[in-house]
Image: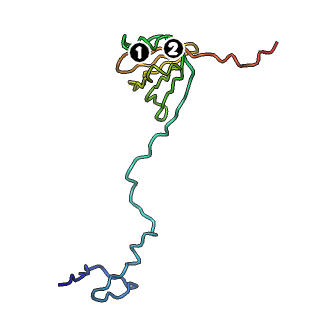
């Protein structure tokens, strides 16, 4: 027993090719090259922006993270558009694991000498390390 290919009825235009029984003919009006007027499915994402700062950890939110206090390392701030999203602290000491903290409610406060990050555990405070490699002109 063999399967029979059924053709579905379609609206024929004046320029449409004739349909032969059992033969599948592509409709030129439905080609993939035609522009599509339907709206896009997804909204465009906000561009991710990453910023890295060399810091020293000044205050931790819990006693469990007490080993991070006074350690220096790299603080990575991930932004979704202009909204601070996550903060990752990578200490120079390889024995201490990295800390990844989601930033709650835009809780990033920054000044020249302090970076405060509010997360669900509490508030982290970091002090930026100033570069001493700059040439001092005298």
Q: Residue at x 54, y 29 (%)?
A: 51
Instruction: Name the secondary structure under disc 1.
Output: strand
Q: Is residue 9 left or right of residue 26?
A: left
Image quarter where the C terminus lies is top right
Instruction: Name the secondary structure under disc 2.
Output: loop
Extreme residue in the front direction: 95
Asked whether the residues under the numbered discs 1 and 2 touch, taking CB atoms below 8 Å apart as contact, a structural biologist would say no
Quadrant in the picture for residue 37: bottom left
Tag in front: 1 or 2 = 2
Using the image as rendered, state which of residue 133 and residue 102 is in the foreground: 133
Extreme residue in the left direction: 1
Extreme residue in the right direction: 138
Residue 3, percent across and down?
A: 21, 81
Residue 79, percent across and down?
A: 48, 32
Label number found at residue 71: 2
Residue to which mark 1 is pinned: 123
Q: Residue at x 58, y 15 (%)?
A: 112
Q: Residue at x 27, y 88 (%)?
A: 21
Crowding around mark 1 (Cα neighbors within 10 Å: few <14, some 14 to 19, many 20+) is some
Residue 14, percent across and down?
A: 38, 85
Does residue 84 lie above or below 25 as drawn?
above
Q: Residue at x 60, y 16 (%)?
A: 129
Q: Is residue 135 left or right of residue 90?
A: right
Crowding around mark 2 (Cα neighbors within 10 Å: few <14, some 14 to 19, many 20+) is some
Q: Earlier in the sequence, mark 1 or mark 2?
A: 2
Cα gap from disc 1 to disc 2, whole angstroms: 16 Å
Residue 87, percent across and down?
A: 46, 25
Q: Is residue 57 left or right of residue 104?
A: right
Image quarter where the N terminus lies is bottom left
Label number found at residue 16: none
């Amino acid at each position: 027993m063999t399967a029979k290919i059924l053709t579905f009825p379609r609206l024929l235009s004046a320029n449409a090719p004739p349909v032969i029984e059992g033969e599948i003919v592509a409709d030129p009006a439905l080609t993939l090259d035609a522009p599509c007027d339907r709206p896009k499915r997804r909204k465009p994402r906000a561009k991710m922006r990453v910023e890295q700062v060399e810091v020293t950890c000044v205050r931790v939110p819990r006693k469990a993270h007490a080993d991070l206090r006074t350690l220096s390392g790299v603080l990575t701030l991930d932004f979704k558009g202009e909204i601070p999203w996550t903060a990752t602290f990578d200490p120079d000491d390889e024995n201490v694991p990295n800390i990844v903290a989601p930033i709650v409610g835009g809780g990033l406060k920054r000044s020249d000498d302090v970076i405060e990050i509010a997360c669900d555990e509490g508030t982290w405070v970091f002090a930026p390390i100033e570069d001493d490699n700059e040439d001092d002109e005298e």
